């Protein structure tokens, strides 16, 4: 038994070390990179209170809050995706796929371009939209209980409906659309300490609550019948996890716009490396999500000359091929518990 556990334990420890080191590296790389480049020495001097006026302005007023927001947004989206994949028993579940992010985005867009006087309440509105969408999905999928398949199918249908509503609002108010185009694609441009102060209390609550979802996620991964045999209230725990994922994705959407694929790509990568144990998968996904969004945002604002590409576009360019490779290299199937799994294709050898 110990020989079987040791390799997995080593992989977990190595994974934590690697992502933490990369997170620190991206943090300092992002502080030095931009239209005006700074040396690592200048960044360190600013962080320790000995920097010049220019470096202090760039580090503290422009880059540092944006990096911290990217960390929070990436962690929230990755945790939301990780939780949804567990409760749906489907590695392809994601806040964007089932419509939760779209619901938050619709409310945020309405508040921004239809009722601009309410723009200061966009984070709260996006959360309410995501929460309401998740609740609607749950109610539509309810039939003497909720199965993961019904939730996903209901989410896909509601996502299409919400996307149509969003397009309709943008057509009706086409003269005001310019203010939300970059937000629709997902962006961290112009984010400041003000935006960080808006979201960090909500993020903190979501991160703390996600700790209490670890055991439930592990049990629900076994299937509804096995969870009931262990004495778990399946519907109660499933409802809590779905609402928590909606809360986290709604807060992330409120400040960063419709950033996709983070909740799909990051948890799946770590699931392939360390397995399905949420005691390790959830924190690793959070760190990995923070790392991915911060790195993608740095690349989007500094690798394309004078053009700042919305981070959502760059993440979609990374995530969409990953999704296609996942489907091309694997085979979607379901096991006895009703879980959707990805099986590697078997090679057929000539005899």
Image: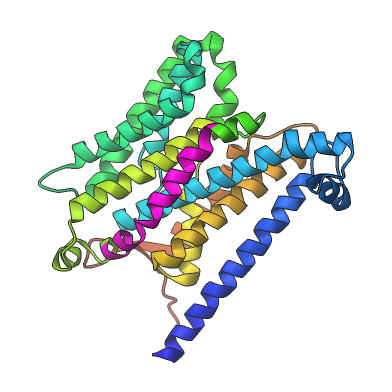
Relative image position of residue 134 (x, y in whole percent): 30, 38
Q: Image height check: is 58 above or below 268?
A: above
On-image quarter of the N terminus: bottom left
- Colour logic: rainbow
Residue 56 included in the magenta stretch of the image: no
Looking at this view, name the residue that lies furthest to the front: 49
At horizontal 28% and vertical 47% (from top left) the residue drawn is: 240
Q: Quadrant of residue 304?
A: top right
On-image quarter of the C terminus: bottom left
Q: Nearer the viewer, residue 273 or 206?
A: 206
Prevailing secondary structure class for the magenta stretch in the rendered image: helix
Is residue 170 rendered to the left or right of residue 192?
left
Asked if one can make out residue 350 in the rendered structure from this viewpoint, the answer is no
Q: Quadrant of residue 297?
A: top right
At horizontal 75% and vertical 38% (from top left) the residue drawn is: 60
At horizontal 41% and vertical 17% (from top left) the residue drawn is: 168
Is residue 204 rendered to the left or right of residue 216?
right
Q: Image height check: is 116 above or below 285?
A: above
Relative image position of residue 105 (x, y in whole percent): 44, 29
Looking at this view, name the residue that lies furthest to the left: 144
Asked if one can make out residue 206 in the rendered structure from this viewpoint, the answer is yes
Is residue 350 rendered to the left or right of residue 37?
left
Number of labels in the image equals 0
Look at the image and give the residue range highlighted in magenta: 198-219
Q: Quadrant of residue 187?
A: top right
At horizontal 19% and vertical 51% (from top left) the residue drawn is: 235
Relative image position of residue 269 (x, y in whole percent): 51, 62
């Amino acid at each position: 038994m110990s020989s079987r556990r040791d390799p997995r334990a080593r992989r977990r420890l190595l994974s934590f070390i690697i992502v933490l080191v990369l997170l620190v590296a991206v943090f300092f790389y992002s502080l030095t990179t931009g239209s005006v480049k700074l040396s690592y020495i200048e960044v360190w001097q600013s962080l320790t209170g000995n920097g010049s006026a220019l470096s202090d302005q760039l580090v503290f007023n422009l880059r540092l809050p944006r990096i911290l927001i990217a960390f929070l947004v990436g962690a929230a989206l990755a945790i939301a995706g990780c939780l949804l994949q567990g409760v749906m028993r489907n590695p392809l579940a994601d806040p964007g796929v089932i419509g939760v992010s779209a619901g938050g985005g619709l409310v945020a867009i309405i508040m921004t371009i239809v009722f601009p006087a309410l723009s200061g309440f966009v984070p709260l509105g996006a959360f309410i939209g995501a929460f309401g969408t998740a609740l609607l999905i749950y109610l539509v999928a309810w039939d003497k209980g909720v199965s993961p398949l019904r939730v996903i199918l209901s989410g896909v249908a509601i996502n299409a409906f919400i996307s149509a509503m969003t397009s309709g609002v943008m057509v009706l108010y086409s003269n005001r659309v310019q203010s939300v185009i970059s937000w629709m694609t997902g962006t961290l441009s112009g984010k400041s300490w003000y935006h960080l102060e808006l979201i960090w209390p909500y993020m903190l609550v979501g991160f703390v609550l996600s700790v209490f979802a670890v055991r439930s996620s592990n049990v629900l991964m076994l299937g509804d019948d096995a969870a009931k045999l262990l004495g778990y209230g399946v519907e109660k725990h499933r409802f809590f996890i779905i609402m928590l994922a909606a809360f986290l994705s709604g807060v992330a959407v409120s400040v960063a716009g419709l950033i996709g694929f983070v909740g799909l790509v990051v948890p799946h990568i770590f699931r392939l490396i360390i397995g399905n144990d949420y005691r390790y998968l959830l924190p690793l996904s959070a760190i990995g999500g923070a790392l991915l969004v911060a790195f993608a945002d740095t690349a989007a604002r500094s690798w394309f000359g004078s053009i700042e590409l919305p981070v959502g576009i760059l993440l979609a360019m990374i995530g969409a091929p990953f999704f296609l490779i996942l489907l091309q290299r694997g085979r979607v199937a379901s096991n006895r518990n009703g879980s959707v799994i990805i099986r590697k294709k078997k090679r057929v050898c000539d005899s």
